[in-house]
Amino acid sequence: MGLSRCGLDNLMLGMRMGERPRVLVTTTPRPIPLLRDLRARPDTATVTGRTDENRLLPESFVSGIRATYGGTRLGRQELDGELIDDVAGALWTRGLLEACRVRVLDERFSTGLEPARTERLGSWRRVVVGVDPPAGSRGDACGIVAVALGRDGHGYVLEDASVSAASPEQWARAVAACAVRNGADRVVAEANQGGEMVRSVLEAADAALPIRLVHASRGKSARAEPVAALYESGKAFHVGGFAALEDELCGLIAGGGYEGPGRSPDRADALVWAMTELLLGKRGEAGVRVM
């Protein structure tokens, strides 16, 4: 958007003719103060569009840019028309997550900013599925996130398989399926809500699945802080884009609190449990009691 606040003010002085003078602004929704202010005005009507809806573009072009930018902050802004802001004091920022995003290139990882990493897809030391079960049978989402420990000692988020409005049987099956798809050797599930019921539900879905129950003695934000530090030190990466998960990560506030989306960061909490299991070791168990 090439229009400055001063330019807009001067433009508005020319809107004195007619009964309903209007201004049409077309732009990429970058998170600049001027655009946020315009969207917040009660007399502003906002219409958004996605690149996929432009039928004049060749399918090969759309699929190509989706493959390159889908799920990233740039892709969500440029292709999906989303206005994405950072939350003040958040443990994760959009810029941090973009810096930690890798893509598969000939079975190797590349950030697009450096040569392909030597770590190869599937050459993991371990894979763990973190689970944040819903409090009720039809309550919040069940966070289900698969994380791998690479031979380079770094953590790689492979999949966000979280499900919403699912019965215990349904989310347990989703956990088991995620574990099978990613070759997980363990499921780490929070047991503050439901205790042994969580274990019995998961075992009913797959009796052979190794399960570790953990109890949270600290709040979600406090548990997440050492995991955020892994990202900042270049030890944790996302293999591709996970929009819903990343939105939750960017809503966790340092020192406590959650700014959304949703009531609870279920996906983010599942990621934290898995990363803690794989990378933080005994340091990550300071607030966790194993059953």
Image (cartoon, rainbow, N blue to C red):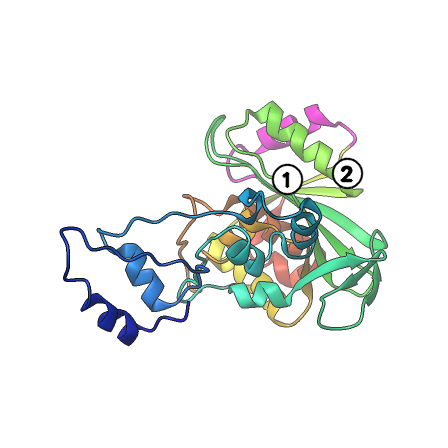
The local secondary structure at tag 1 comes to: loop
**Which residue is the extreme one toward the front?**
18
Quarter of the image where the N terminus is located: bottom left
Please say whether residue 193 is one of the residues in the magenta stretch: yes
Q: Choose the circle earlier in sequence order: 1 or 2.
A: 1
Quarter of the image where the C terminus is located: top right
* Above or below, 285 relative to 235: above
Q: Residue 290 appears at what percent x and percent y?
A: 63, 46
Question: Which disc number belongs to residue 161?
Answer: 1
Kind of residue at disc 1:
Ala
Please say whether residue 98 is one of the residues in the magenta stretch: no
Identified at 15% across, 59% down, the residue is 17
Q: Is residue 232 left or right of residue 258?
A: right
Q: Residue 262 appears at what percent x and percent y?
A: 42, 44
Kind of residue at disc 2:
Arg
| Most foreground residue, 272 or 259 | 259
Question: What residue would you read off at disc 2?
Answer: 181
Can you see residue 66?
yes
Q: Is residue 92 left or right of residue 126?
A: left
* Chain part drawn in magenta: 191-208
Identified at 63% across, 68% down, the residue is 99
Identified at 58% across, 52% down, the residue is 288
Can you see residue 218?
no
* Above or below, 56 relative to 141: below
